Amino acid sequence: MKIQTFSRYEFKYVLNYNLAKKIESEVRTFMNYDGYVHPEMGNRYVVRSLYFENNLNHNFNEKVDGIKKRSKYRIRTYSRKNTDNIPIFLEEKGRINQRTYKNRVEIDSADLEYFYNTDCYANNLHHLRLNNKLIEKFSFDSIRKQLKPTVIIDYIRRPYINKYGLLFRATFDSHIKSCISQELFPDCHQDSWLECLAGYTILEIKFERSIPPWFHRIIECYNLKRVSVSKMVIGMEACKLAYDI
C-alpha cells in the first residue's frame, strides 16, 4: 500500500448562494473540471469523511484554538454506498504553521471493520501496519490519544483545476451534512443527518506557491474574506458533540 503525500496552502471562504454562483461563473473562464466529476450530478461528486475524535474533543479544540501544528485522522470516500469500485482512504490531515499537508493510503472496504473497533487497534491492524508507516502511526496515535470514529461529514463538491501555469485548485462544497456514527456507511434514518451552513457554500483554494492574478482580482472585486472554517468542527457542533466557547 503506497502512501500519497500532499503539501500546499489552503484558503477558505464562506459564500452565500448568489455570490457562489457569480464567482463560479468567473472561475470557469480560467479553470477546468477535474477528472473525477460526474456529469449526471452536475459535474460534481460526493465527499464523505468519517472523523476520529476522543472524549476530550482533542482535535476539535486544537482547531478552534488555532494551534499552528496539529493533525487529525479520517476515513474518506466518494460515495454514499459501499460498492466494489469506490476508493476508500485512511487520511492524516494536518497543518504546520500556514501550510497544510495530507498523507493517505487506500484501504480495502473489507478492512473497514478493523478501524471501527477502538478497543484493539493494535491487534486488528497488525496485518496492515507491518508494511505501512501511516497505518502504523494511526494505530499508535489512536491508542495513545484514545481516538474513536465519531462523526461523518458528507457534502457535494464541484472541483476545478488551473488550465495553465502552477498548480491551483478551487472546490465549491455545498449541501454539507453531519451524522453521529462509528461507521463510514451507517444504516441510519434520514432524520439522523443534520444540515451544516444551510444555503452556504465553502470555497476552498489550494495552491503550492502563489494565487493566480486573475483570482486576486476576484478576491478584490467581491471583497472576499478568508475564514478559518472546518467541516469537522461545524459538523460536531451541529451534532452537539462539542462547542466553540
Image (cartoon, grey):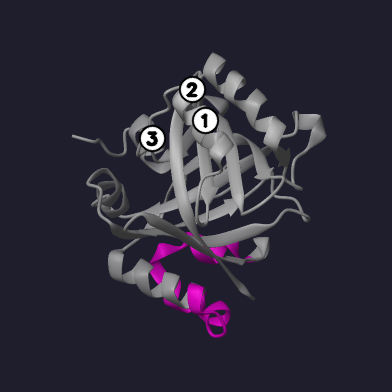
Please identify the quadrant where the N terminus is shown: bottom right
Q: Residues within 10 Å of mark 2 (few under 14, many from 20)?
A: few
Label whose residue precedes the other's in the sequence (2 or 3): 2
Does residue 220 sit above or below 100 in this rendering? Answer: above
- Hey, which residue is sitting farthest top in the picture? 18
Specify the label residue 217 is tagged with. Answer: 1
Q: Is residue 182 left or right of residue 32?
A: left
| Number of numbered discs overlaid on the protein picture | 3
Q: Identify the residue shown where x is 69% and y is 36%.
A: 30
Q: Secondary structure at mark 2?
A: helix
Please identify the quadrant where the C terminus is shown: top left
Q: Nearer the viewer, residue 67 or 7?
A: 7
Q: Are marks 1 and 2 in contact (CB under 8 Å)?
A: yes
Identify the amino acid type marked 1: Arg
Q: Which residue is mark 3?
A: 226
Does residue 71 sit above or below 230 in this rendering? Answer: below
Measured in 3D between alpha carbons, the distance from the residue under mark 1 to the one under mark 2, in whole angstroms, is: 6 Å
Q: Secondary structure at mark 3?
A: loop
Q: Are marks 1 and 3 in contact (CB under 8 Å)?
A: no
Identify the amino acid type marked 3: Arg
Q: Identify the residue shown where x is 25% and y is 48%.
A: 66
What span is colored magenta in the figure? Answer: 111-134
Let me know if residue 123 is in the magenta part.
yes
Q: Residues within 10 Å of mark 3 (few under 14, many from 20)?
A: few
Residue 135 visible, this angle: yes
Q: Residues within 10 Å of mark 1 (few under 14, many from 20)?
A: few
Q: Secondary structure at mark 1?
A: helix
Q: Nearer the viewer, residue 137 or 210?
A: 210
Q: Which residue is mark 2?
A: 221
Of tags 2 and 3, the one toward the viewer is 2
